[in-house]
Amino acid sequence: MSFGLPTFPGGFHPPDRKAPSAGCAIAPGPMPERLAVSLAQGLGAPSRPVVAAGDRVLRGQLIAEPGGFVSAALHAPTSGQVQAIGECPHPAGLRANAIYLVPDGADQWAPGTNVPASEDAVAASKPKEIVEKVRAAGLVGMGGAAFPTHVKLSPPAGKAIDTVIVNGCECEPYLTADHRLMLERPADIVKGLRLLVRAVGAARGIIAVEANKPDAHERLLREVRGIEGLACRMVAVKYPQGAEKQLIKALLDREVPSGGLPMDIGALVQNVGTAVAVTEALYFNRPLTERVVTVSGEGLERPANLLCRIGVPYKALLAAQGVRPGARRLVSGGPMMGLAQWTADVPVLKGTSGVLVLSTPPPPDWSACINCGKCVESCPTYLMPNRLSKLGEFRRFEDMAAHHALDCIECGVCTWQCPAKRPIVHWIRQGKNELRLAKLKAEAAKKKAETPEGVLPQ
Amino acid sequence: MSESAGTPGLKSAPPTAASGFPDQWLVSSSPHERSTESVAQIMWTVVLALLPTCVAGVVVFGWYAGVLIVISAAAAVAAEAAVQKVLHRPVTIGDGSAVVTGVLLACCLPPNCSWYVPVVGSFVAIFIGKQLFGGLGRNYFNPALIGRAFLQFAFPSQISMPQWPIVTRASVFESVTGSIFKVAAGSPGGPDATSLATPLAQIKPALPAAVSPLAALGEPLNQDKLDTLRDLFLGNIPGSIGEVSKLAILLGGLILLLNRYINWRLPLAYVGMALLAVLLLPVKDSSGHWTGLYAAERHWDIIGETLSVHLLSGGLLLGAVFMITDMVTSPTTSKGQVIYGIAGGILVALIRLYGGYPEGVCYSILLVNAARLIVEKYTVPRVFGTRTRKS
């Protein structure tokens, strides 16, 4: 427990299980026989490929352009030949198209990339130029959601951002990728933060580190010392401290309005990995082609923090680190919010913070809610998960909306603690999805009704 | 997902190099880890927390009290199994909730009632109070209290006896209640031979009289009073099996608090409001004048003693620690818990001061049980992000 440190109301402390990989310095990840760079990296439209099967590409070369404003560019993670563009299992379930790339082993950078920029040139770049470079480098939020960074850096007119927060909380159990980045590249994180602050014209930048990583806090504190407008703050160890809205609440005591965005209250949150990627893009002209991935879990022989190329199949990581017998689950991300995988053929995405091999048993049978109230007490969004779960169980989706199901951040605090083992978050997710579908249906029906030809006789 | 490129041979990714592990994974919704805490663990912990109270009951009243507790618990478990069998439900006696109901029911029974009283009570508690509503988690009323309320009508002579047995001493606040308590103090019989009404039953008609001749009662705290306080606290008083020893109840409460199975708000609001209401509500004295404890003004000894009797005798603490806090039947919102506790406290005082029974804990809790959902409905927390920005 860490008393007196900034935090948000609610939440809880799951066992953090970070020890197996916390001491492992970032090591180069395996280079597989074939990479699969998914065209669906995260939220937003899928990217559009600009290469074709048979093309030779160099590392950092643009291979897919953004498919819209809320979409990101993709670059070749290494030099080699495009084998095909086709379907590939995607960590989010289903399948998505991917560019299959066979490395040639030379790992040669494309011309114009991997060229250091002078300190003066970077210092002289205008906010718009920074945003443009971030967009061109294909940056997305590397904490998990993979929201295109340039979109966050381009608030609509009238929405001023006063505070940039670099999120080094890493509150998910097992994950240590951000921790290692903070230890090994504190200067680049601070450089990235300064660029982000300049890009949005903010007054200050704050790096937030959970109190269970005092070493990282100390190093970052040393880096920000003497820089006007920058601070490094320790926050309480509590899940989900690293959730965007909860972190803003803890540091600024502002609440992102229901249904709104951090920019509505003048805040911008970026993961430490993204801050490093900003530095890489601006100071070295390196597009985003790799990221740190924590590979851990009781089902893994050698936990590690690997600097992985985007598109490395999980299979290659597991083969390199060794899978123990009895491994049951393969999870993309942390155990609280990560997605269970059905196959290890899925590739690492720009938002993949961890690949976990867990031996936790199948979900236990659930029973009736006994109203213990743990979920209500600890919900960081102040919902009533007990009620939502009962409504979800009986498919009362309209009533779920009335109980603010759409505000749920799906952090899993309720479900982790539930003594009746009820799949609360699962039901809420299902409810949200049904509500979304119902809304689409209603909109379509309304549109049809408004068109004269579409009006059906009574 | 996106438009199918339909590259032949790439419908699914071709296997990569032999990786030495079977690619078969368990897929389920997040979170992928759960706490090990189970409903059974909670229920058996409540049984453990009730244990000091049961032991105290046996120490104070003798082995028959223990027999009653065991009969009651066994009857509750048997009733649960039988009812679930008949209703074609999975038999869940292992979760400990029936044991909790049985033991709690025994705790509110007189230590000398007949053996069949807890059997009938447990059956009613489990069948009507719990299984007819759908079983654990779906009941609106505390099953043990449903059983207790039923017994009150079914066996009135066994439940509301004017004379309760007491084992050792019986000097209870003479100064407050005057003659009535002297029955006990003055009775020359040995410890086993004495029987008398519970302190609450004694105080009920006595309170108004006690309040009016205030001037005569300003006695300082003496050894006798301290002894009485100690008896009230330890349990050397008449009462139900599980309600007499406050020490044991508080010990159980501590176990529940440390495990976070109860929340301090409910018991505190309940007890606090009950005492406040006893202090503030007017009662008619023997001469027909409306007066009340508040009229005792600075006579702290009288106020203190009366409140002590209300707090330390009767089932107030047992109810506050083990019954109003029942997870299934109490609100989950923090504001709701305070309101619920306050409502229960007012009801206790109303029943004790104006009602037909000396004790109001059972009915006060059953009444607020009925109001649980509506209390929760109006205390739903403000959702994150629905407040205007702080300037």
Image (cartoon, rainbow, N blue to C red):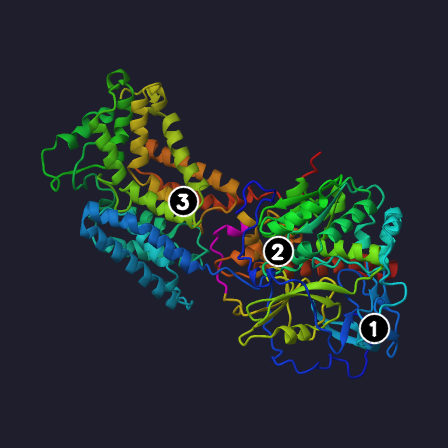
Chain where mark 3 sits: B
Real-space CA distance between mark 2 and mark 1, rounded to the nearest whole angstrom: 38 Å
Chain where mark 2 sits: A
The spot of residue A455 in percent (x, y) is 83, 60
Instruction: Residue at 56%, 71% (x, y): give it.
Output: A299
Graded by Cα atoms within 10 Å as few (under 14), some (14 to 19) or many (20 or more), the crowding at tag 3 reads many
Instruction: Residue at 60%, 49% (x, y): give it.
Output: A214
Q: Which mark is nearer the camera, 3 or 2?
A: 2
Q: Which mark is residue A411?
A: 2
The spot of residue A451 in percent (x, y) is 86, 58
Q: Which residue is mark 1?
A: A79
Q: Earlier in the sequence, mark 2 or mark 1?
A: 1
Q: Looking at the picture, which amino acid does disc 3 mark?
A: Ile
Q: Which residue is mark 3?
A: B324
Which residue of the protein is positioned furthest toward the top in this rendering?
B215
The spot of residue A251 in percent (x, y) is 66, 42
Q: Which mark is residue A408?
A: none
Q: Main secondary structure of the magenta part?
A: loop
Chain where mark 1 sits: A
Mark 2 vs 1: CB contact within 8 A = no
Judge whether residue B275 can be spotted in this image.
yes
Real-space CA distance between mark 3 and mark 2, rounded to the nearest whole angstrom: 31 Å
